[in-house]
Amino acid sequence: MLQLFFVGCKFNITDDQLQIIKLMFFNNLVDIVMPSTPCSQAEVKAMKEFLTLHNFRANIFLEEQTTIAHKNNHEFSSASPKHRFLQLHQALENPNSQIIWCARGGYGCAEIIEYLYSIDRPQKNKIFIGFSDITSLNIFLHQQWQYPTITAPVLIQCAYDKVSVNSTRTIIDLIKGNINTLSYQLVNLKNHNFSQIKGELVGGCVSVIAGNFGCKNQLNWHDKILFLEDEGEDGERLDRYFQQITTIIKETHQRPLAIVLGNFMQGNLHGSPKLENIEIAIERFVKKTNDIPFFQEQSFCLGHSFEMLPLVVGGMTTISDKNILKQNIF
């Protein structure tokens, strides 16, 4: 029960009534964007119904040009990069929305990055949600525009129950302002002694990060907390990505403050990686990074995971001497 006071009057407000009041002042328009693999018309309908169920209103710019009639048996986008860019651009500039939520990851997001370099940073900050292939876009938004993003389930996962109820509830609560901080228990893989590590958190899906090496959109992790996760990759392929990262650190002296691993263990429809080989790749990575503090989130809820929970890319992050990662929500 909450008590509100207005000019000599006192009102008792129940929790349900308080939620209704919060929604009255909450901008609940969500722009759905599809910068990677497209969605079918049936999938778009399901996502709109999901948003409606949670008291959001859905909007899709250029829906006809970016949506397909039926699902493909591949992840290539049939929508042109220009149309996908224009959809995102209109969402970024939409004065009536506060949230941009990616429909899905998949493949193809990197194709629209070149168009983003031709426009100015939008004046209005928004909540931007996406991960996996969207990592390319998250890198650009943070590095070029200092625009924080949330790595969290994409809409199609929520609409089709591809993540847990808790996963969906958490991202909904976050964007409605019901969550003020994120906190995760880490495992200190090197037993590194420290009092506190503090800095911006950057990173995301490691295979997508590697796809941006050598480009203008290459991730800058110097003096930042580097977060890495992925799915469906076997240990040998992960070891190749990790070797790239350690080589770049040695050759350029661009050192992260710390490295934090999310989930690598859950496979996907493309196959089930051998978990023991993934563990070998991680062990080799830890040894090669010398004195850089190295952590792993202990419940495997960060990144590709059925229990996926949100993390702010570009957000100020602290790791305490109790190995707890904490972020205050912007």
Image (tube, grey):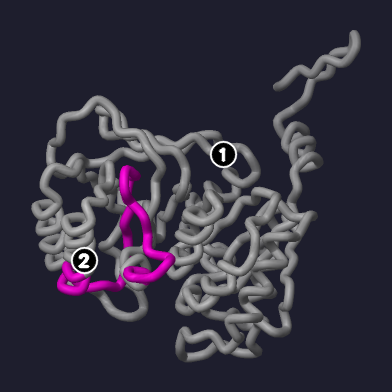
Q: Earlier in the sequence, mark 2 or mark 1?
A: 2
Instruction: From the viewer's perspective, tell me whether residue 74 is left or right of residue 88.
Output: left
Residue 275 in percent (x, y) is at 18, 66
Q: Is 83 in the magenta?
A: no
Tag 2: residue type? Answer: Gln
Instruction: From the viewer's perspective, tell me whether residue 257 is left or right of residue 67.
Output: left
Instruction: From the viewer's perspective, tell me whether residue 85 is left or right of residue 194.
Output: right
Residue numbers of the magenta segment: 212-240
Instruction: From the viewer's perspective, tell me whether residue 196 is left or right of residue 212.
Output: left
- Dot 2, crowdedness within 10 Å: few (<14), some or many (≥20)? few
Indicate the quadrant where residue 318 lies. Answer: top left
Residue at image position (13%, 42%) is 291
Q: Can you see residue 183?
A: no
Kindly identify which numbered label has been placed on residue 320.
Answer: none
Residue 22 in percent (x, y) is at 74, 37
Indicate the quadrant where residue 206 lies. Answer: bottom left
Q: Is 223 in the magenta?
A: yes
Q: Main secondary structure of the magenta part?
A: loop
Residue holding disc 2: 244
> Of 111 and 53, which appears nearest the observer?
111
Say which quadrant the N terminus sits in.
Answer: top right
Q: Can you see residue 156?
A: yes
Residue holding disc 1: 330
Residue at image position (66%, 80%) is 83
**SS at circle 1:** loop
